Image (cartoon, rainbow, N blue to C red):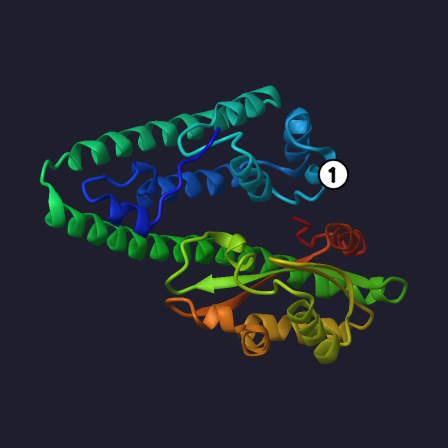
């Protein structure tokens, strides 16, 4: 399934050509809201079953890299398995693993997107020609771009807030029982780092960072050095593009220092100062680095097992 791609130059040069309705920010908003909504209702066991169901369409090596439902959703979209308003394959997968209740969300989103497309087509039926029409097309594109930038930032904030709330709960439990664990084992922490958009880039979530920064070994090394130099952590895994790190901490004090900097925003400021590159500065709008921190699940469960009865083990 091939998605149509348009840009400002194509639309403006076309004169009377009307922009593709799929570029409507409302459609992208519905598409991404569906991802967040479905992700909330899919536990890890079910996610594993869904990944197995898509094994005939996605290579096993690529499936192994998928950590949560948002990653899977993005993977399906990139490969054309699902598209804006077209989620038949995803619907089949959910039904196959016993998540029929979530199929209602898919149908609701598909119907909403269908109505948006109809409304968009009907509202763009102007028969005016020449420079007046050409100017309107350009103006509509800029307006949609500004609105989409705002929506993209809101989506990123929503995911960040959800992640932060979960981390407050997890880390409170984690530090309570960490002393026992760190006597015998190091602690691994996973970080996702991306650019937080304030304007000018119409990409979403952690994909924002892929094409704008850390595109070479020098930038990647600068990013990892921030953690090694400031917290004494050793870098276990580092992926280019959207930066994904697994850090190994051997002392509680180093981990607590990193966590305090994360909550206060100092960690984001450090990365912004050290890593923001010239290509990012040249973009319209300004970007800052957003950091999502997640304790490795095996380590987290190990800590929870060591806690006394009565402690919340979510």
Left or right side of 60 for 116:
left
Pick the front one: 149 or 7: 7
Instruction: State the image coordinates of residue 232 (x, y, percent, origin top left).
Output: 77, 76
Which quadrant holds residue 294? bottom right
Residue shown at the point (45%, 68%) measured from the top left: 287
Q: Residue at x 53, y 41 (%)?
A: 40
Vertically, is 255 above or below 75?
below
Coordinates of residue 203 in the picture (x, y in percent): 45, 53
Residue toward you, 245 or 255: 245
Query: Foreground residue, 244 or 264?
Result: 244
Pinpoint residue 33: horizontal percent, then vertical percent. 42, 42
Q: Where 39 sits versus 229, above or below? A: above
Viewer can see residue 43? yes
Judging by the rendered image, the residue that carries numbered circle 1 is 61
Name which quarter of the figure residue 97 lies in: top right
Which residue is at 44% across, 43% downward?
A: 32
Q: Residues within 10 Å of mark 1 (few under 14, many from 20)?
A: few
Q: Is residue 139 above or below residue 117?
A: below
Whether residue 99 can be seen here? no
In terms of image quadrants, where is residue 277?
Answer: bottom right
Comparing 94 with 238, the one in front is 238
In the image: residue 8, left or right of residue 184: left
């Amino acid at each position: 399934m091939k998605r149509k791609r348009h840009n400002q130059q194509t639309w403006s040069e076309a004169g009377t050509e009307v922009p593709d309705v799929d570029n409507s920010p409302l459609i992208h908003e519905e598409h991404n809201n569906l991802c967040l909504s479905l992700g909330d209702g899919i536990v890890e066991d079910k996610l594993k079953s869904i990944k197995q169901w898509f094994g005939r369409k996605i290579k096993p090596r690529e499936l192994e890299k998928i950590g949560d439902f948002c990653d899977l959703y993005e993977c399906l979209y990139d490969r054309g398995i699902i598209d804006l308003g077209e989620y038949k394959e995803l619907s089949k997968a959910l039904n196959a693993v016993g998540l029929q209740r979530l199929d209602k969300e898919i149908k609701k989103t598909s119907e909403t997107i269908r109505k948006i497309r109809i409304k968009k087509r009907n509202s763009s039926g102007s028969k005016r020609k020449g420079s007046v029409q050409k100017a309107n097309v350009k103006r509509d594109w800029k307006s949609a771009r500004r609105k989409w930038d705002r929506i993209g930032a809101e989506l990123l904030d929503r995911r960040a807030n959800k992640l932060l709330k979960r981390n407050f709960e997890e880390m409170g439990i984690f530090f309570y029982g960490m002393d026992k664990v760190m006597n015998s084992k190091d602690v691994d922490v996973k970080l996702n780092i991306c650019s937080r958009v304030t304007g000018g880039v119409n990409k979403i979530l952690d994909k924002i960072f892929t094409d704008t920064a850390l595109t070479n070994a020098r930038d990647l090394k600068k990013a990892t050095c921030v953690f090694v130099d400031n917290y004494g952590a050793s870098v276990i895994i580092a992926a280019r593009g959207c930066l994904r790190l697994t850090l190994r901490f051997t002392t509680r004090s180093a981990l607590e220092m990193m966590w305090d900097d994360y909550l206060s925003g100092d960690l984001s400021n450090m990365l912004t100062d050290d890593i923001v590159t010239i290509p990012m500065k040249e973009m319209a709008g300004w970007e800052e680095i957003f950091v999502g921190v997640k304790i490795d699940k095996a380590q987290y469960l190990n800590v929870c097992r060591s806690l006394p009865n009565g402690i919340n083990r979510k």
